[in-house]
């Protein structure tokens, strides 16, 4: 299926691993021109070189910066304007469910997690607002932790729920400009360097028991499975979908 993404200027934040990397690669497979982002310049450079070898130099641009810091977000906006002039697709992927402090009710824990998972998205959308033409798509990565009470830190759950609310607000605001805004809510996604890999290293038996008990499909998702959904929502095939949330969790969510 041709998703109609060929030549689309696509920005994927947090794209040096996991869902972000898989999404960037999926857009490249569809012929998009992709701006990858990461904090580690060496890692970002290596990934850009690898992907450029497969998809061509003109399809890849790398931007080193921390998308939780306002100064770096502003630099990204300037970089996009100078390099491409506009944006067609944006994947807002920066986030972390790892606890910052041992006390889940510590206000500093909440502030830090909200900065990473929600405030960064607000600042990014504000900084890039003038780079859209009369069409486009935004997909924000939320989590099923924002809908169900799980083992995730409460601050993370609240922030990811906030992402859905924020996206719904933006969908209404941007619709007259032809810009669609949606979210995906992944369940348990296993990838190298991710939180679940870390937890498996600490308690493999317990983690596998949890997945077997809580997830009807009895397995983790791969980041590519989330990336496929993101690409679809970004595409012309989803032209009448906005303000929606797509849950991708192997049946784990219990609500109807």
Image: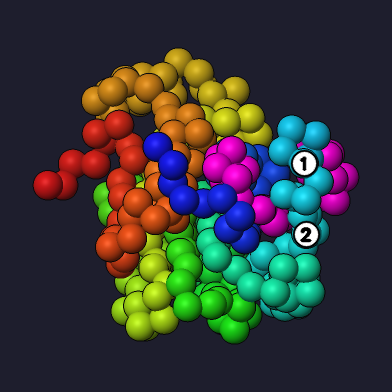
The x and y percentages for residue 121 are 54, 69
Scheme of image coloration: rainbow
Name the residue rendered at 33%, 55% in the picture: 238
Query: Label 1 belongs to which residue?
Result: 56
Is residue 208 in view?
yes
Residue density around tag 2, few if under 14, some if 14–19, many if 20 or more, within 10 Å:
many
Asked whether 42 falls inside the magenta stretch, the response is yes
Query: Label 2 belongs to which residue?
Result: 63
Q: Nearer the viewer, residue 90 or 94?
A: 90
Residue range (magenta): 26-51
Q: CA distance from mark 1 to mark 2?
A: 17 Å
Name the residue rendered at 54%, 24% in the picture: 200
Q: Is residue 128 above or below residue 66?
A: below
Residue density around tag 1, few if under 14, some if 14–19, many if 20 or more, within 10 Å:
some
Q: Nearer the viewer, residue 193 or 128?
A: 128
Residue 215 lies in what quarter of the image? top left
Judge depth for marks 1 and 2 and give the one in front.
1
The x and y percentages for residue 102 are 56, 51
The x and y percentages for residue 170 are 39, 76
The x and y percentages for residue 23 are 56, 44
């Amino acid at each position: 299926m041709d998703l109609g993404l060929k030549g689309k200027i696509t920005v994927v934040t947090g794209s040096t691993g996991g869902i972000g990397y898989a999404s960037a690669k999926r857009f490249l497979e569809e012929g998009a021109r992709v701006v990858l982002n990461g904090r580690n310049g060496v890692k970002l450079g290596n990934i850009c070189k690898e992907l450029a070898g497969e998809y061509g130099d003109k399809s890849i641009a790398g931007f080193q910066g921390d998308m939780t810091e306002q100064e770096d977000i502003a630099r990204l906006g300037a970089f996009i304007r100078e390099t491409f002039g506009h944006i067609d697709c944006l994947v807002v992927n920066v986030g972390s469910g790892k606890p910052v402090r041992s006390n889940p009710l510590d206000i500093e824990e909440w502030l830090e997690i909200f900065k990473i998972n929600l405030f960064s998205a607000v600042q990014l959308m504000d900084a890039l607002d003038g780079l859209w033409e009369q069409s486009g798509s935004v997909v924000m990565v939320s989590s099923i932790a924002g809908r169900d009470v799980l083992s995730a830190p409460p601050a993370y759950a609240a922030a990811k729920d906030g992402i859905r609310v924020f996206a719904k607000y933006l969908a209404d605001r941007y619709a007259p400009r032809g810009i669609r805004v949606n979210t995906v809510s992944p369940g348990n996604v296993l990838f190298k360097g991710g939180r679940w890999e870390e937890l498996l290293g600490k308690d493999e038996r317990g983690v596998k028991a949890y997945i077997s008990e809580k997830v009807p499909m009895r397995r983790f998702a791969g980041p590519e499975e989330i990336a496929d959904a993101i690409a679809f929502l970004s595409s012309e095939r989803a032209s009448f979908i906005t303000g929606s949330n797509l849950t991708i969790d192997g049946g784990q969510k219990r609500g109807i």
